[in-house]
Every structure is written in C-alpha cells, then in structure tokens.
Image (spheres, coloured by chain):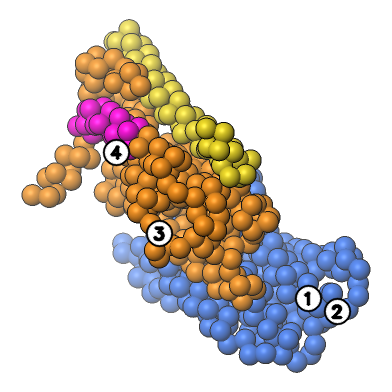
Chain colours: A blue, B yellow, C orange
Amino acid sequence: MTLPRVGFVSAASALVARDLSLALRRSGDSLQPLGFFLVVCTLFPLALDPQLSLLRDIAPAALWVGALLSSLLALDLLFREDAQDGTLEQLALCGLPLQGLLLAKTAVHWLLTGLPLVLIGPLAASALGAPAAAMPGILAALLLGTLALSLIGAVGAGLTMSLKRNGSLLALLVLPLAVPVLIFGARATVLAIAGESLAAPLYLLAAIAVLAATLAPWALAAAVRIGLE
Amino acid sequence: MLRFLQMGGYARYVWPSYALTALVVGLNVRWALASVRAAQSEARRRLASLKAAS
Amino acid sequence: MAWVWFHRFGSPPHFYRLATRLAPWFAWPAALLCLAGLVGGLVLAPPDYQQGDGFRIIYVHAPAAWLSLMVYVVMAASAAVGLIWRMTVAYSVAASCAPIGASFTALALATGMLWGRPMWGTYWEWDPRLTSELLLLFLYLGYMGLRNAIDDVGRADRASALLAIVGVVNVPIIHYSVIWWNSLHQAPSVMKFGRPTMPAAMLVPLLLMLAGFTAYFLALLLTRARGELLRRERNARWIGEALASAPTGPGSAC
C-alpha cells in the first residue's frame, strides 16, 4: 500500500492551521507575552519622574527592551510542547523540507506573539509621550524588528528545547544575537519621535530581517535535528 | 628604577593590568594541564576497569 | 593529496601524538617572544608624547583582545569542521578554545577599563570596541553554558557547534552596528597615539607580544585538546597505547 504523496504547501498549511487552532484554544498562553510587554512599558514611567519630556527620551528604550524581553518569554512556547509529544520528530521524518515547515511554525509564532506587539506598540509609545506623527515609523520598525527577533529567537529555542526548564540560558544565547535589532530599532524610534527621516536604521533592520529569514530556517532545522537525536 | 615602577604616574593602572594578565596566563596554563591530567587518569581508570571486567 | 593530510590530521591517535609533541615547540618560543616583547615594551620603548607611560598597557591589552577574537574564529571554524565532517578532533579543538577565549575576553575588557580610566576619565565607555567585546564575552559564556547544560557529549558538541557558527555570523554585525550606533551618539574617543606612524620602538614589542600570545594559545590549545579527545574517544584501543608510551606528556615539564 502506498501512502498518498503530500505536497509541501498542503503540509505547511495544515501545520499552520494546527498551530493556530492549538494556540487559540489556549489563548492565555499567547497573551502572556503581550501582557508582559505592557507591564514593562508601564514600569518605566513608574520608575521615573513621569515628566513627559523625559519619558519621550526613554520611550524608544522602554519600547524595545520590552519587545525584546517579551519575545524571549514567548519563545518557550515555540518548540517545547511539540518536542515533548513527538510532533517535531514526525515533522523531521516526514520527508518534506524541515526548513520550510519550521519557518511556517515560526511564522505562526510571530503572528501570535510578534504581531500583537506591532499593533499595541504605537499605543504604548504614545502613552510614553511619542507624538502621533511618529506612529508609522514606530510601526514599521516594530514590524521588521519583531520579525527578526522571532527568527533569531527561534534558533535559540531550537538549541535549548530539549533542556530542562532553563529560561536564563535561552536569554543568554539570544540576547547577544538580538542586540543589533535592539540598536537599530531603538534608533529608528528615536528618529521617528524626533520627526526626522528614519530610512537608514529601517533599511538596516530590514536587512537583518531578510538575513535572518534566509539563514534561520537552516540553523533551525539543524538545531531541531540535533535536539531530536 | 623608581621611574620604571612609577610608570610616569600611571602605575595604578599599568601594573594591575600586567598583574591581571599574568594571572590569566598562569591560570590558563594550570587549567590546561589539570584538564589533560584529569582526562588521562580517568582514561587509565576506565581501561583498568575494562580489563578487570573482561 | 591535501585531503589525505586533512583526514590523517583528523585521526584521533595521530592528532594526540602530534599535539603531545608539538605543544612544547609552541610553549617555549611563546615564553621567549613574550619576554622579548615585555622588555621592549616596558623598558626600551619611549613614553608616548600624549599618554606617557600609560600607553604601555597596550602590550597586554592588545594581545588579549587579539586572542579573544582569534580564538572565537578558531572555535567557530573547528566547530564547522566538526559538524560537516563529524570529526571528533575538531569538536575537541572547539571545546578547548572556549575557556581560553572567554578568559582572555574578560582580560581584554578589564585591561581596557584600566586603560580607559586615565585616558578617558571613566572606567567604562559604550565605545564600539568595549561594547562589542562585552557581547563577545556573552557569546562565549552562552557557548559554554549550552555545552554544560546538555549531558550527552556528542549532542552538546553539535548544539554548541551550531551556536558558535551562528555567533560568528553575528560578530561582524554586532561590531558594525555598535560602531554605527556609537558614531551617532558621540564623537568616538579613539586612542590616539600616532597609530598610523607608530614608531618602530613601540611597534616591534607589540608585534612580539602578539606573536608570543598566539604561540601560547596554540600550546594551550594542543594541551587541552588532548584531554578533550581522551574524554570523547571512550573505548578506543589507541588510548591504551598512547597513555602507556607517554605517561604525562612533556606538559608536565613546564
């Protein structure tokens, strides 16, 4: 008996649908990183004297540190359960390109954890004193930045997925790699708030995101294969 | 000689730098040698127990 | 023909014997080169017209920084070789690099701080080099942390090898992003002591120290790699012969 050949696209869309429905069933899990982001952004004005002018200076830093930390928090969700219940093994063995399947998983992960940040980010920024004119720029920077962070973080998650709950190691691995995103993202936000052109950091963010999208799937597939042995 | 030790007034920075360097250089040598010796004695022990078992 | 040499080099017993014999040939020249460099740098070189005798920190800071970068590249390269050719020798080399590289990165940071204090007036500056160096330290610590966290040696080797390679892609990105960031924040405070026209009396000891430290690293690497190899090649016949023929190796003479 021969099994019906499954095409990559249908397999990937099935994977996406499965991940989405699983996540929606436990929507609390996906909302936690968002909540954490808002908490971090709130902590900054609480810790400082909430004079609007100083807040505006801190806003980019608060925004991006919050984004970075909350995406770290979200990374645990990515592979751990699937590694434990054997789904990842099936994905690795099924004969379809693992890189593509893992990229699909990461895309879903971004939809659930990165996209909310992109949408809520401008709101948080305006609460921290950013003018309305800065919003498109902040939106664009967050879009590119969260994409890059999801991809970079996924590689770290892949490397640590078989370890016992050790969140600090994941942070140690991911943070040095994520620093360029932080630098360019914060810089873009500063320029957006100041009303100047943020083309330069935005292009660099885009370059990092593209580089990550190109290289991460291969690193991810290798990491998952190593972790499954 | 005193001028050498004083390093033109920068002694406070120059000599600790050299001391730290000597420390790191020395520690690395110690670690490396200890690491090899530990591996060797462990390997000997393993071989001996294998021979005893066979 | 090169492949034959390459694969012979990758054979554990051959590498072990080679490492045992070569290590002292790097160790003693390293000591001599460093001694010469120290005499030249501390005694013979004239004081800098701007920094006085304080510039002499360069004779330990620059080699430490050089080592921190070079060792990472060696680590990543041997990790790649290990992953591609499944070579135990390569993994042993990579594992040996990490503690050496991490300690010299920390030393580079410490000596950089001690140099910065009199020259910049502050122990720390978010200068491109210091910041990149700090991130490099985190990369080393992450590598060592991941390796420690995985119990199975083979899996630890492969996972940390992947991490090292991902990190090496990131090193230039980190470096350039920090330069870019720094150039927008402040005028970079560069150590100016006539670098383009550094007089020979200052330059030669520096080169001697750099060469000496490189040789020193190679001696350390070969020594450590032997131990790592022994730990990995568990029940191989050659171990018995290697241990019997050279009880503790020339390393004990140092």
Rounded to the nearest angstrom, the CA distance separating label 1 from label 2 is 7 Å
Amino acid found under the numbered disc labelled 3: Met
Which disc number belongs to residue C198?
A: 3
Marks 3/1: CA–CA distance: 42 Å
Q: Which amino acid type corresponds to the residue marked 4 in the rendered image?
A: Val
Q: CA distance from mark 1 to mark 4?
A: 52 Å
Marks 4 and 2, how far apart at CA: 59 Å
Could you tell me how far apart the alpha carbons at marks 3 and 2 are, in whole angstroms?
Answer: 47 Å
- Tell me the residue that label 1 is attached to: A57
Please give the name of the residue rendered at 45% of the width and 46% of the height, measured from the top-left corner. Answer: C59
**Which residue shows up at 35% across the image and 40% down it?**
C212
**x and y percentages locating residue A81 in the rendered image:** 60, 54
A160 relative position to A46: left or right:
left
Chain letter of the residue carrying label 2: A
Q: Tell me the magenta residue range.
A: C13-33
Q: Chain of mark 1?
A: A
- Between circles 3 and 1, the one closer to the viewer is 3
Return the mark for residue C89.
4
Q: Which residue is mark 2?
A: A53
Q: Secondary structure at mark 2?
A: helix
Labels 4 and 2 share a subunit: no
